[in-house]
Image (cartoon, rainbow, N blue to C red):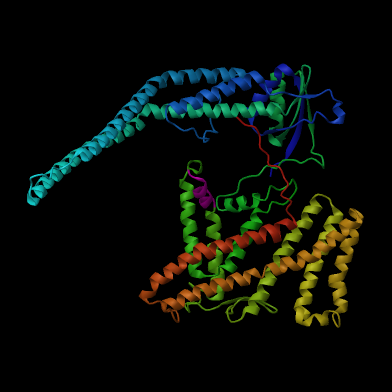
Amino acid sequence: MQDLQKLIVILLERHQEPVHLFLAKMGGVQYIKVDCEEESYNGFLHACPIPKEESLMNSKIQTRILRDFEEMHLKPNNNNGKVALPPGNTIKEILVNVEHKLDEIEDESNSIIDLLDLASTLKKKKGQQLHDWEATHKKLNSNYKPSIEQHTSEELISEADGHLTDISNQLKETGKEILDLQRNEYSEEYSLREIPEIGEVQSKLLDLHGMTLKIDDLLEAEHDMAHCDSIVYFKAWVLKKQIFIAKEGIKKITNGKCVIELEKPKSNDNVPIVIKRKKRLFEGFEILTYSLGFPRKGEINPVYLMAFAFPFLYGIMFADVGHGAILFLGGILLLIARNRKDMEKIGEIPRMVLFAAGIITLCGVSAMFWGYLFGEFFGPSGVLHPVLLAQIGPFYFGGFDPVHEPLRLLRFTILIGVSFITLSLLIRVINHLKRREGAHAIAGICWIWFLLGGFFMWVYWGGISQITSWFGEGLPMLLALVMAPLIISMIIMAKAENIMHGVNFTVEVFIESLGHTLSFCRLAALFLAHTALSTMFLDLAGVKNGNFPPSSIPLIAIGTILILCIEGLIVFVHTIRLHWIELLPKFYSAKGTLFQPIEIK
C-alpha cells in the first residue's frame, strides 16, 4: 500500500476546469466530497453544480452515437475505457472536438447505411416470395379433386400416381429455389458483415462512446467541489510521489493565484487505500478477500494469509493424490490460458474460472500433499499407504488411516482450528497496536490466553467425558487458564468503552472460541465423506490392493468427474465459509475505501 496525503486547494473559478483536467490527466488524484454543511464553513460554501450546457451536449452526442449503432445493426460495448480524449483546455472544447469527429464518422457511414437499407429491403422481398410460394402450393393442393366418374380403380390409381409424381417434381424445384434464395441471403449478410468499412466505423464509434463516458466522470467529479462567488474550493487524496507534480501544475495553470495546503490524514479520516495488484497466481484469493470489503489504512491485508490457509484447509478435506493431480494440471492449463486471453473480451463465467486458476493449482498441490500423508490415491485404493510427517503429543500429522481412526483425525482438525484462530487473533493484536489501541490489544491477548488455556485443559484433562476433573483436580488450572482471561478482558473493555461493551465482548470471546473451534471439525467430516465416495466407486469397479483392472477405468473416470465437480465444489464452499466466518472477521474490518483516482488520457 502506498501512502496518500490530503491536498487542499483554493483557486479562481475560471481556473477550475483547466486544473480539473490537469489532475485527471496526471492520475493519482481522488476528490473528497466537500461537506458544505460543515459548521466551520458557516454556510458560505455551496456545492459546484454539474455544468448543464456541457452535460446536455454530452447527452446529445451519446444519443447520436447509439442511434448510429442501431442504424448499422451494431451493438455498443463498454470495453473502451482506455480511449484518449481529444485536445482541449475545457470540457466544452473537448465536447466540440468529439462532436466534430462524430460528424465526420456519420458522413463516412451514410453509404454503408444506404447499403444496409437496400439489403434489408431485398431480404423482405425474398421473404414475401417464399410466403407467396407456400400459399400457391397450398392452393394447388386444395383445388385438386380427382374425377372418379367412368374410371376403373386401376385408372384412378395410375392417375393419382401421375399427379403425385408431378407434385414431387414441383416440390423439388421449389425446394431448390428456396435453398438458393436462403443461400444468397446468407451470402449477402455474410459479405455485409465482412465489409471492412463497417469494422472501422464501429471502432471509431466505440472510441467516441468511451470518450463521452469519460466526460460523464469528469462532470460528476466537479460536483465534489465547492464554490463561493468566483472562488472554488476542493480537497483531494493524492499519492505522495505525485504531490509535487500536482502543486506545481496547479500553480502554473493559475499563474500562482491559488492557495494550496497539505494536510496529514487525521485519525478519524477514512483514508482510501492503494492496493498493488498481486501476481496472477494469487489474484483469485484477492477476489475472494475483497468480496468482503477492502482493508482500512494500517490494517494488515489478509490476501497472502488466505493464499496460504485456503489451499491448506481445502487439501485436508479433499486429500487425494490422484484427484489433487488432476486439479493441479487443470490449474496449470487455466494459468496458461489466463496469460493468453484478453480478459475484457470473454464472458463473466469464463473470466471468473480463469481468475481461479491459481486457487485450483495450489489446492491441487495441497490435496496431493495431504493425500500422500493419509495414503489416498483415487480413494483408499492400496496404491499408497499413510506416511507420518510429525507427532506432537496426541496429535498425528498423517501416518494413520482416518476411516479406521476417526477420533485421531478429529483431534488433528481441532489442533488445526486452534492454530488458525490463534494466528487470526495475533494479527488482530498487531492491528490494534498499529492503531495505538492499547486496551483493545490487551483484550486480544486475553482472548488468545483463553483459547489456548481451554485447549490445554482439553488436551490435559480430556473432553466432555472428563469435565468433572476440570472442576475437581483441575480447578486451579481452570481458574488461571480460562476464568482469569475472561474476567481481565471484561474489566479492560468496560474501562475502554462501557460496562455493557465489556460484558458483550466477554460473551463473544467465550462463544466464538468454542463454536469456531468446533466448526473446524468439518475438515474431518468432509474428508471422510470424500473417502467414502471414492471407496464406493473403487468397490463397484473391483479395485483391490492397488490393482486397477482395465475394466475399472471407465467407472473410476466417471466417479472422479462426479467427485471433482460435486464434492470439489462443496469443499470449496466450506473452505470459503471457514475464512469468511471463523478467521477473517477476527482481525479484518472490510470497511476500507479503495483509492479510485479520476483518470483520463
Magenta region includes residue 485: no
**Which residue occupies the foreground of this view, 76 or 10?**
76
Q: Is residue 56 left or right of residue 493?
A: left
Position of 512 relative to 49 (above/below): below
**Which residue occupies the foreground of this view, 342 or 550?**
550
Total marks drawn?
0
Asked if residue 255 shows in the view, the reply is no
Q: Quadrant of the C terminus?
A: top right
Identify the image quadrant of residue 543: bottom left
Asked if residue 265 shows in the view, the reply is yes
Span highlighted in magenta in the image: 346-355
Residue at image x 82%, y 30%?
Answer: 37
Image x and y of residue 350, in percent = 49, 49
Magenta region includes residue 350: yes
Position of 266 relative to 95 (above/below): below
Residue at image x 75%, y 40%?
Answer: 271
Image x and y of residue 77, in percent = 50, 35
Q: Is residue 73 left or right of residue 375?
A: left
Image x and y of residue 347, in percent = 49, 45
Q: Quadrant of the N terminus?
A: top right
Q: Residue furthest front?
A: 149
Magenta stretch: helix, strand or loop mostly: helix
Residue at image x 26%, y 37%?
Answer: 134
Position of 23 relative to 514 (above/below): above
Image x and y of residue 169, in percent = 15, 41
